[in-house]
Protein backbone atom coordinates (compact mmCIF):
# COMPACT_ATOMS: atom_id res chain seq x y z
CA UNK A 1 0.00 0.00 0.00
CA UNK A 2 2.93 2.37 0.60
CA UNK A 3 3.91 2.10 -3.05
CA UNK A 4 0.27 2.73 -3.99
CA UNK A 5 0.24 5.91 -1.88
CA UNK A 6 3.38 7.17 -3.59
CA UNK A 7 1.88 6.46 -6.99
CA UNK A 8 -1.38 8.26 -6.18
CA UNK A 9 0.55 11.12 -4.59
CA UNK A 10 2.60 11.67 -7.73
CA UNK A 11 -0.45 11.57 -10.01
CA UNK A 12 -2.67 13.82 -7.89
CA UNK A 13 0.02 16.38 -7.06
CA UNK A 14 1.23 16.55 -10.65
CA UNK A 15 -2.28 17.19 -11.95
CA UNK A 16 -3.01 19.84 -9.34
CA UNK A 17 0.24 21.73 -9.84
CA UNK A 18 -0.15 21.62 -13.62
CA UNK A 19 -3.73 22.93 -13.46
CA UNK A 20 -2.84 25.89 -11.24
CA UNK A 21 0.40 26.68 -13.03
CA UNK A 22 -1.74 28.01 -15.88
CA UNK A 23 -3.43 30.55 -13.58
CA UNK A 24 -0.42 31.69 -11.52
CA UNK A 25 0.45 35.38 -11.74
CA UNK A 26 3.96 36.37 -12.83
CA UNK A 27 4.98 37.68 -9.41
CA UNK A 28 4.04 34.38 -7.75
CA UNK A 29 5.83 32.13 -10.26
CA UNK A 30 9.07 31.75 -8.21
CA UNK A 31 7.06 30.60 -5.16
CA UNK A 32 4.98 28.26 -7.29
CA UNK A 33 8.06 26.72 -8.94
CA UNK A 34 9.64 26.35 -5.50
CA UNK A 35 6.59 24.40 -4.29
CA UNK A 36 6.72 22.16 -7.36
CA UNK A 37 10.40 21.52 -6.65
CA UNK A 38 9.54 20.62 -3.04
CA UNK A 39 6.90 18.17 -4.28
CA UNK A 40 9.26 16.49 -6.76
CA UNK A 41 12.08 16.28 -4.21
CA UNK A 42 9.78 14.93 -1.49
CA UNK A 43 8.39 12.28 -3.82
CA UNK A 44 11.82 11.21 -5.09
CA UNK A 45 13.24 11.00 -1.57
CA UNK A 46 10.40 8.91 -0.15
CA UNK A 47 10.20 6.69 -3.19
CA UNK A 48 13.96 6.20 -3.13
CA UNK A 49 13.84 5.07 0.51
CA UNK A 50 11.71 2.08 -0.49
CA UNK A 51 14.58 0.59 -2.48
CA UNK A 52 17.29 0.75 0.21
CA UNK A 53 18.79 -2.32 1.82
CA UNK A 54 17.68 -3.27 5.31
CA UNK A 55 20.96 -2.11 6.86
CA UNK A 56 20.32 1.47 5.71
CA UNK A 57 17.37 2.08 8.06
CA UNK A 58 19.35 3.09 11.15
CA UNK A 59 19.17 6.03 13.54
CA UNK A 60 22.54 7.28 12.34
CA UNK A 61 21.48 7.45 8.71
CA UNK A 62 18.17 9.03 9.71
CA UNK A 63 20.02 11.72 11.66
CA UNK A 64 22.29 12.64 8.74
CA UNK A 65 19.45 12.45 6.25
CA UNK A 66 17.00 14.64 8.19
CA UNK A 67 19.62 17.17 9.31
CA UNK A 68 21.00 17.87 5.84
CA UNK A 69 17.63 17.98 4.10
CA UNK A 70 16.09 20.20 6.80
CA UNK A 71 18.96 22.67 6.75
CA UNK A 72 18.83 23.01 2.96
CA UNK A 73 15.05 23.45 3.02
CA UNK A 74 15.11 26.07 5.78
CA UNK A 75 17.82 28.03 3.96
CA UNK A 76 15.66 27.91 0.82
CA UNK A 77 12.57 29.13 2.69
CA UNK A 78 14.59 31.98 4.21
CA UNK A 79 15.94 32.95 0.80
CA UNK A 80 12.43 33.07 -0.70
CA UNK A 81 11.22 35.11 2.29
CA UNK A 82 14.06 37.60 2.03
CA UNK A 83 13.61 37.87 -1.73
CA UNK A 84 9.96 38.90 -1.36
CA UNK A 85 9.76 40.62 2.04
CA UNK A 86 13.31 41.51 3.16
CA UNK A 87 12.83 39.42 6.31
CA UNK A 88 13.00 35.79 7.47
CA UNK A 89 9.40 35.35 8.68
CA UNK A 90 8.35 33.39 5.54
CA UNK A 91 5.10 35.35 5.10
CA UNK A 92 4.10 34.80 8.78
CA UNK A 93 4.65 38.32 10.12
CA UNK A 94 1.69 38.25 12.54
CA UNK A 95 2.59 35.93 15.45
CA UNK A 96 6.20 35.34 14.43
CA UNK A 97 6.92 39.08 14.45
CA UNK A 98 5.33 39.41 17.90
CA UNK A 99 7.43 36.54 19.23
CA UNK A 100 10.55 38.07 17.71
CA UNK A 101 10.01 41.57 19.15
CA UNK A 102 9.21 40.31 22.65
CA UNK A 103 12.05 37.78 22.60
CA UNK A 104 14.50 40.45 21.50
CA UNK A 105 13.34 42.84 24.21
CA UNK A 106 13.42 40.12 26.89
CA UNK A 107 16.95 39.08 25.87
CA UNK A 108 18.12 42.48 27.11
CA UNK A 109 16.48 42.02 30.55
CA UNK A 110 17.16 39.80 33.55
CA UNK A 111 15.26 36.52 33.17
CA UNK A 112 12.41 37.06 35.66
CA UNK A 113 12.01 40.69 34.66
CA UNK A 114 11.58 39.56 31.07
CA UNK A 115 8.91 37.02 32.06
CA UNK A 116 6.99 39.65 34.04
CA UNK A 117 7.24 42.06 31.12
CA UNK A 118 5.74 39.54 28.70
CA UNK A 119 2.90 38.50 31.03
CA UNK A 120 1.74 42.11 31.20
CA UNK A 121 0.58 41.76 27.60
CA UNK A 122 -0.08 38.07 26.93
CA UNK A 123 -1.02 34.87 28.78
CA UNK A 124 1.38 32.14 29.83
CA UNK A 125 0.30 29.69 27.09
CA UNK A 126 2.63 31.42 24.61
CA UNK A 127 5.36 32.13 27.11
CA UNK A 128 7.47 29.16 26.03
CA UNK A 129 7.97 30.55 22.52
CA UNK A 130 9.38 33.89 23.69
CA UNK A 131 11.46 32.31 26.46
CA UNK A 132 13.28 30.11 23.96
CA UNK A 133 13.73 33.02 21.57
CA UNK A 134 15.03 35.35 24.31
CA UNK A 135 17.59 32.76 25.47
CA UNK A 136 18.84 32.20 21.92
CA UNK A 137 18.97 35.92 21.13
CA UNK A 138 21.27 36.41 24.10
CA UNK A 139 23.79 34.45 22.04
CA UNK A 140 23.08 35.76 18.53
CA UNK A 141 20.76 38.62 17.71
CA UNK A 142 19.29 36.98 14.60
CA UNK A 143 16.22 34.92 13.84
CA UNK A 144 18.44 32.51 11.90
CA UNK A 145 19.68 30.99 15.16
CA UNK A 146 16.05 30.23 16.05
CA UNK A 147 15.61 28.53 12.66
CA UNK A 148 18.70 26.40 13.34
CA UNK A 149 17.34 25.51 16.79
CA UNK A 150 14.05 24.41 15.22
CA UNK A 151 15.95 22.20 12.78
CA UNK A 152 17.50 20.48 15.81
CA UNK A 153 14.01 20.12 17.33
CA UNK A 154 12.83 18.54 14.08
CA UNK A 155 15.76 16.12 14.16
CA UNK A 156 14.99 15.09 17.75
CA UNK A 157 11.33 14.62 16.80
CA UNK A 158 12.29 12.40 13.87
CA UNK A 159 14.55 10.21 16.03
CA UNK A 160 11.85 9.94 18.72
CA UNK A 161 9.25 8.95 16.12
CA UNK A 162 11.63 6.32 14.75
CA UNK A 163 12.24 4.95 18.26
CA UNK A 164 8.52 4.85 19.07
CA UNK A 165 7.65 3.25 15.73
CA UNK A 166 10.15 0.42 16.12
CA UNK A 167 8.03 -0.83 19.04
CA UNK A 168 5.33 -1.92 16.58
CA UNK A 169 6.67 -1.81 13.00
CA UNK A 170 9.77 -2.77 11.04
CA UNK A 171 12.83 -0.43 10.98
CA UNK A 172 12.22 0.23 7.29
CA UNK A 173 8.71 1.56 7.78
CA UNK A 174 9.73 3.38 10.97
CA UNK A 175 12.49 5.14 9.01
CA UNK A 176 10.18 6.14 6.15
CA UNK A 177 7.49 7.21 8.62
CA UNK A 178 9.84 9.56 10.47
CA UNK A 179 11.18 10.89 7.16
CA UNK A 180 7.73 11.41 5.64
CA UNK A 181 6.67 13.52 8.61
CA UNK A 182 9.94 15.39 9.21
CA UNK A 183 10.53 16.30 5.55
CA UNK A 184 6.97 17.44 4.87
CA UNK A 185 6.90 20.92 3.38
CA UNK A 186 4.71 22.26 6.20
CA UNK A 187 7.04 20.94 8.92
CA UNK A 188 10.08 22.47 7.21
CA UNK A 189 8.16 25.74 6.80
CA UNK A 190 7.48 25.86 10.56
CA UNK A 191 11.20 25.37 11.22
CA UNK A 192 11.84 28.53 9.17
CA UNK A 193 8.85 30.60 10.31
CA UNK A 194 9.84 31.66 13.83
CA UNK A 195 6.67 30.15 15.31
CA UNK A 196 6.47 27.78 18.30
CA UNK A 197 5.11 24.60 16.71
CA UNK A 198 8.43 22.84 16.03
CA UNK A 199 9.38 22.82 19.70
CA UNK A 200 5.83 22.15 20.91
CA UNK A 201 5.39 19.09 18.69
CA UNK A 202 8.76 17.82 19.84
CA UNK A 203 7.53 17.93 23.45
CA UNK A 204 4.41 15.91 22.56
CA UNK A 205 6.39 13.24 20.70
CA UNK A 206 9.01 13.05 23.48
CA UNK A 207 6.24 12.50 26.03
CA UNK A 208 5.11 9.38 24.15
CA UNK A 209 8.71 8.35 23.59
CA UNK A 210 9.17 8.35 27.38
CA UNK A 211 5.87 6.50 27.84
CA UNK A 212 6.92 3.63 25.56
CA UNK A 213 10.31 3.44 27.30
CA UNK A 214 8.52 3.17 30.66
CA UNK A 215 6.55 0.21 29.30
CA UNK A 216 9.63 -1.43 27.78
CA UNK A 217 12.26 -0.84 30.47
CA UNK A 218 10.07 -0.41 33.59
CA UNK A 219 12.30 2.50 34.68
CA UNK A 220 10.81 5.35 36.70
CA UNK A 221 13.49 7.69 35.32
CA UNK A 222 11.44 7.96 32.14
CA UNK A 223 8.43 9.00 34.20
CA UNK A 224 10.45 12.05 35.23
CA UNK A 225 11.24 12.77 31.58
CA UNK A 226 7.58 12.54 30.58
CA UNK A 227 6.62 14.88 33.44
CA UNK A 228 9.14 17.46 32.21
CA UNK A 229 7.57 17.32 28.74
CA UNK A 230 4.11 17.94 30.21
CA UNK A 231 5.37 20.89 32.26
CA UNK A 232 6.92 22.28 29.11
CA UNK A 233 3.59 22.03 27.26
CA UNK A 234 2.05 24.24 29.94
CA UNK A 235 3.96 27.14 28.38
CA UNK A 236 2.85 26.33 24.82
CA UNK A 237 -0.67 24.87 24.72
CA UNK A 238 -1.96 23.65 28.10
CA UNK A 239 -4.85 21.61 26.65
CA UNK A 240 -2.29 19.21 25.15
CA UNK A 241 -1.44 18.05 28.68
CA UNK A 242 -5.06 16.96 29.08
CA UNK A 243 -4.93 15.04 25.79
CA UNK A 244 -1.62 13.33 26.65
CA UNK A 245 -2.72 12.15 30.08
CA UNK A 246 -6.23 11.30 28.88
CA UNK A 247 -4.96 9.20 25.99
CA UNK A 248 -2.60 7.19 28.20
CA UNK A 249 -5.24 6.69 30.90
CA UNK A 250 -7.86 5.63 28.36
CA UNK A 251 -5.43 3.18 26.76
CA UNK A 252 -4.55 1.64 30.11
CA UNK A 253 -8.22 1.26 31.05
CA UNK A 254 -9.11 -0.38 27.73
CA UNK A 255 -6.24 -2.84 28.05
CA UNK A 256 -8.02 -4.23 31.11
CA UNK A 257 -11.49 -4.19 29.57
CA UNK A 258 -12.46 -6.15 26.46
CA UNK A 259 -15.55 -6.65 24.36
CA UNK A 260 -18.69 -4.64 25.07
CA UNK A 261 -17.18 -3.21 28.23
CA UNK A 262 -14.38 -1.69 26.19
CA UNK A 263 -16.84 -0.19 23.71
CA UNK A 264 -18.88 1.27 26.55
CA UNK A 265 -15.75 2.81 28.05
CA UNK A 266 -14.90 4.45 24.74
CA UNK A 267 -18.35 6.01 24.63
CA UNK A 268 -18.04 7.16 28.25
CA UNK A 269 -14.61 8.67 27.63
CA UNK A 270 -15.90 10.75 24.74
CA UNK A 271 -18.98 11.73 26.75
CA UNK A 272 -16.68 12.84 29.57
CA UNK A 273 -14.58 14.75 27.08
CA UNK A 274 -17.62 16.67 25.82
CA UNK A 275 -18.73 17.33 29.42
CA UNK A 276 -15.30 18.76 30.21
CA UNK A 277 -15.30 20.92 27.09
CA UNK A 278 -15.44 24.04 29.25
CA UNK A 279 -12.11 22.97 30.75
CA UNK A 280 -10.59 22.48 27.30
CA UNK A 281 -11.95 25.81 26.11
CA UNK A 282 -10.61 27.64 29.16
CA UNK A 283 -7.17 26.26 28.30
CA UNK A 284 -7.56 27.92 24.92
CA UNK A 285 -8.10 31.35 26.50
CA UNK A 286 -7.10 33.19 23.39
CA UNK A 287 -9.71 31.42 21.33
CA UNK A 288 -12.60 30.93 23.71
CA UNK A 289 -13.15 34.51 24.94
CA UNK A 290 -13.41 33.42 28.56
CA UNK A 291 -14.58 29.84 28.06
CA UNK A 292 -18.22 30.54 27.25
CA UNK A 293 -19.43 28.57 24.20
CA UNK A 294 -21.83 31.27 23.01
CA UNK A 295 -19.06 33.82 23.14
CA UNK A 296 -16.88 31.42 21.20
CA UNK A 297 -19.43 31.28 18.38
CA UNK A 298 -19.84 35.05 18.47
CA UNK A 299 -16.07 35.49 18.24
CA UNK A 300 -15.89 33.07 15.29
CA UNK A 301 -18.68 34.96 13.50
CA UNK A 302 -16.96 38.29 14.16
CA UNK A 303 -13.72 36.91 12.71
CA UNK A 304 -15.56 35.67 9.62
CA UNK A 305 -14.80 32.03 10.41
CA UNK A 306 -18.44 30.93 10.26
CA UNK A 307 -19.04 30.51 6.54
CA UNK A 308 -22.55 30.18 5.04
CA UNK A 309 -23.99 28.80 8.29
CA UNK A 310 -22.89 27.21 11.54
CA UNK A 311 -23.80 23.63 10.42
CA UNK A 312 -21.85 24.13 7.16
CA UNK A 313 -18.84 25.44 9.09
CA UNK A 314 -18.90 22.45 11.44
CA UNK A 315 -19.11 20.12 8.44
CA UNK A 316 -16.05 21.77 6.89
CA UNK A 317 -14.18 21.48 10.21
CA UNK A 318 -15.10 17.80 10.53
CA UNK A 319 -13.89 17.11 6.99
CA UNK A 320 -10.66 19.00 7.71
CA UNK A 321 -9.97 16.81 10.75
CA UNK A 322 -10.91 13.57 9.04
CA UNK A 323 -8.65 14.18 6.05
CA UNK A 324 -6.98 17.56 6.02
CA UNK A 325 -6.51 20.36 6.34
CA UNK A 326 -6.88 20.41 2.58
CA UNK A 327 -3.94 22.03 0.76
CA UNK A 328 -4.07 25.40 -0.97
CA UNK A 329 -2.20 25.03 -4.27
CA UNK A 330 -2.22 28.56 -5.72
CA UNK A 331 0.23 31.08 -4.24
CA UNK A 332 -1.50 34.27 -5.34
CA UNK A 333 -3.78 35.18 -2.41
CA UNK A 334 -1.79 33.72 0.48
CA UNK A 335 1.74 32.52 -0.37
CA UNK A 336 2.18 31.11 3.14
CA UNK A 337 -0.56 28.51 2.65
CA UNK A 338 0.87 27.36 -0.68
CA UNK A 339 4.13 26.34 1.02
CA UNK A 340 2.19 23.64 2.89
CA UNK A 341 0.72 22.06 -0.25
CA UNK A 342 3.38 19.47 -1.20
CA UNK A 343 3.33 17.88 2.25
CA UNK A 344 -0.41 18.22 2.85
CA UNK A 345 -1.36 16.34 -0.34
CA UNK A 346 0.64 13.36 0.94
CA UNK A 347 -0.81 13.77 4.43
CA UNK A 348 -4.40 13.76 3.09
CA UNK A 349 -3.76 10.43 1.37
CA UNK A 350 -2.15 9.12 4.55
CA UNK A 351 -5.26 10.09 6.52
CA UNK A 352 -7.29 7.59 4.49
CA UNK A 353 -4.92 4.86 5.65
CA UNK A 354 -5.11 6.22 9.20
CA UNK A 355 -8.85 5.47 9.32
CA UNK A 356 -8.23 1.97 7.92
CA UNK A 357 -5.74 1.53 10.76
CA UNK A 358 -8.15 2.92 13.37
CA UNK A 359 -10.71 0.26 12.43
CA UNK A 360 -8.20 -2.58 12.78
CA UNK A 361 -6.62 -1.21 15.96
CA UNK A 362 -9.96 -1.37 17.78
CA UNK A 363 -11.09 -4.56 16.06
CA UNK A 364 -7.86 -6.45 16.79
CA UNK A 365 -7.30 -4.69 20.15
CA UNK A 366 -3.78 -3.49 19.33
CA UNK A 367 -3.26 -2.13 22.85
CA UNK A 368 0.16 -0.63 22.20
CA UNK A 369 -1.34 1.92 19.80
CA UNK A 370 -4.23 3.06 21.99
CA UNK A 371 -2.44 6.11 23.49
CA UNK A 372 -1.40 7.45 20.09
CA UNK A 373 -4.85 6.82 18.64
CA UNK A 374 -6.72 8.50 21.49
CA UNK A 375 -4.45 11.53 21.48
CA UNK A 376 -5.26 12.05 17.79
CA UNK A 377 -8.99 11.51 18.34
CA UNK A 378 -9.13 13.79 21.37
CA UNK A 379 -7.41 16.67 19.62
CA UNK A 380 -9.50 16.22 16.47
CA UNK A 381 -12.68 16.37 18.57
CA UNK A 382 -11.54 19.47 20.44
CA UNK A 383 -10.60 21.35 17.26
CA UNK A 384 -13.97 20.56 15.73
CA UNK A 385 -15.66 21.71 18.93
CA UNK A 386 -13.93 25.12 18.96
CA UNK A 387 -14.11 25.53 15.15
CA UNK A 388 -10.34 25.39 14.69
CA UNK A 389 -10.34 22.27 12.51
CA UNK A 390 -9.24 24.21 9.43
CA UNK A 391 -6.15 25.63 11.15
CA UNK A 392 -2.97 23.70 10.37
CA UNK A 393 -1.15 25.17 13.38
CA UNK A 394 -3.75 23.78 15.75
CA UNK A 395 -3.76 20.32 14.15
CA UNK A 396 -0.01 19.86 14.01
CA UNK A 397 0.50 18.15 17.42
CA UNK A 398 -1.48 15.04 16.42
CA UNK A 399 0.06 14.71 12.95
CA UNK A 400 2.95 12.50 14.20
CA UNK A 401 0.34 10.08 15.56
CA UNK A 402 -1.44 9.96 12.21
CA UNK A 403 1.85 9.16 10.46
CA UNK A 404 2.90 6.45 12.95
CA UNK A 405 -0.50 4.76 13.01
CA UNK A 406 -0.87 4.87 9.22
CA UNK A 407 2.62 3.46 8.68
CA UNK A 408 1.92 0.70 11.23
CA UNK A 409 -1.03 -0.35 9.10
CA UNK A 410 0.95 -0.21 5.85
CA UNK A 411 3.78 -2.22 7.40
CA UNK A 412 1.32 -4.98 8.31
CA UNK A 413 -0.59 -4.68 5.05
CA UNK A 414 2.58 -4.90 2.92
CA UNK A 415 4.28 -7.60 5.00
CA UNK A 416 5.40 -10.65 3.05
CA UNK A 417 4.00 -12.98 5.70
CA UNK A 418 0.64 -11.11 5.63
CA UNK A 419 -0.53 -9.92 9.02
CA UNK A 420 -3.26 -12.36 10.04
CA UNK A 421 -5.73 -9.76 11.26
CA UNK A 422 -5.83 -7.66 8.08
CA UNK A 423 -7.97 -9.38 5.49
CA UNK A 424 -9.62 -8.30 2.23
CA UNK A 425 -6.44 -6.62 0.96
CA UNK A 426 -7.75 -6.25 -2.57
CA UNK A 427 -10.94 -4.63 -1.33
CA UNK A 428 -8.99 -2.20 0.85
CA UNK A 429 -6.79 -1.37 -2.13
CA UNK A 430 -9.85 -0.59 -4.25
CA UNK A 431 -11.35 1.55 -1.48
CA UNK A 432 -8.10 3.50 -1.23
CA UNK A 433 -7.97 4.04 -5.01
CA UNK A 434 -11.57 5.27 -5.04
CA UNK A 435 -10.90 7.50 -2.03
CA UNK A 436 -7.89 8.99 -3.80
CA UNK A 437 -10.10 10.07 -6.69
CA UNK A 438 -12.54 11.66 -4.23
CA UNK A 439 -9.62 13.42 -2.51
CA UNK A 440 -8.43 14.85 -5.82
CA UNK A 441 -11.80 16.45 -6.51
CA UNK A 442 -12.11 17.65 -2.91
CA UNK A 443 -8.76 19.44 -3.17
CA UNK A 444 -9.68 20.81 -6.59
CA UNK A 445 -13.01 22.10 -5.27
CA UNK A 446 -11.36 23.55 -2.19
CA UNK A 447 -9.00 25.58 -4.36
CA UNK A 448 -11.70 26.70 -6.79
CA UNK A 449 -13.97 27.92 -3.95
Image (spheres, rainbow, N blue to C red):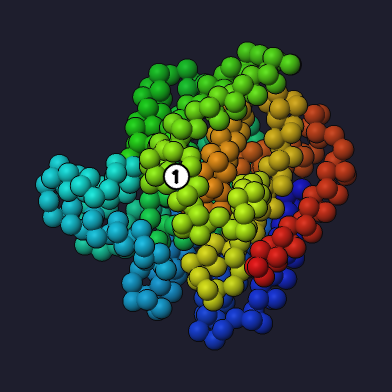
Q: Quadrant of residue 344?
A: bottom right
Q: Quadrant of residue 230?
A: top left
Question: Which residue is painted at 36% across and 62% down in the image?
Answer: 94
Instruction: Using residue 141 as the reference point, say whether residue 352 is left or right of it.
Output: right
Tally of marks? 1
- Examine the rendered structure and indicate whether residue 154 appears above or below residue 94: above
Could you say whether the residue bearing mark 1 is in a helix, strand or loop? helix
- Examine the rendered structure and indicate whether residue 59 appears above or below residue 334: above
Question: Which residue is painted at 64% across and 23% down in the image?
Answer: 266
Name the image quarter holding the C terminus. Answer: bottom right
Instruction: Using residue 182 as the reference point, say whether residue 112 is left or right of it.
Output: left
- In this rendering, does residue 117 appear at all? yes
- Examine the rendered structure and indicate whether residue 95 appears above or below residue 403: below
Rendering coords of residue 423 (x, y %):
85, 34
Q: Quadrant of residue 325?
A: bottom right
Give the residue pinned by disc 1.
Answer: 295
Q: Count neighbours of disc 1 (C-alpha within 10 A) and say few if under 14, some if 14 to 19, many if 20 or more.
A: some
Question: Which residue is painted at 60% across and 81% down in the image?
Answer: 24
Instruction: Using residue 102 as the reference point, say whether residue 227 is left or right of it.
Output: right
Relative depth, front residue between 194 and 165: 194
Instruction: Using residue 211 as the reference point, say whether residue 21 is left or right of it.
Output: right
The residue most toward the bottom is 26
- In this rendering, does residue 72 appear at all? no
Rendering coords of residue 7 (x, y %):
75, 59
Relative depth, front residue between 135 and 359: 359
Relative depth, front residue between 212 and 388: 388
Question: Which residue is painted at 61% across and 21% down in the image?
Answer: 268
Rendering coords of residue 78 (x, y %):
40, 69
Rendering coords of residue 422 (x, y %):
80, 33
Amino acid sequence: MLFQIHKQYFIIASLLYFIYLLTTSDCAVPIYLFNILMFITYFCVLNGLLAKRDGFYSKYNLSIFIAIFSLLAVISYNYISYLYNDNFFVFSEADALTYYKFSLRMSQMPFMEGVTYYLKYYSYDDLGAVLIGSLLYRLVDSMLILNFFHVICGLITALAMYSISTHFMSPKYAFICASAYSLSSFILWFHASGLKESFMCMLVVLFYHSYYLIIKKKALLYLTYSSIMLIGLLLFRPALIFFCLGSVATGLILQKRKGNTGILLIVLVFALFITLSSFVESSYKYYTSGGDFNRLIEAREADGMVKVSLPFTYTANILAQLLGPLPTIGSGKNPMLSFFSAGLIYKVLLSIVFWFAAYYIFRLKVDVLYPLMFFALFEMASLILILEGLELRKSLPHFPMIYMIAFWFMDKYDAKDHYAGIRSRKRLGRIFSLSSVVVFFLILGWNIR
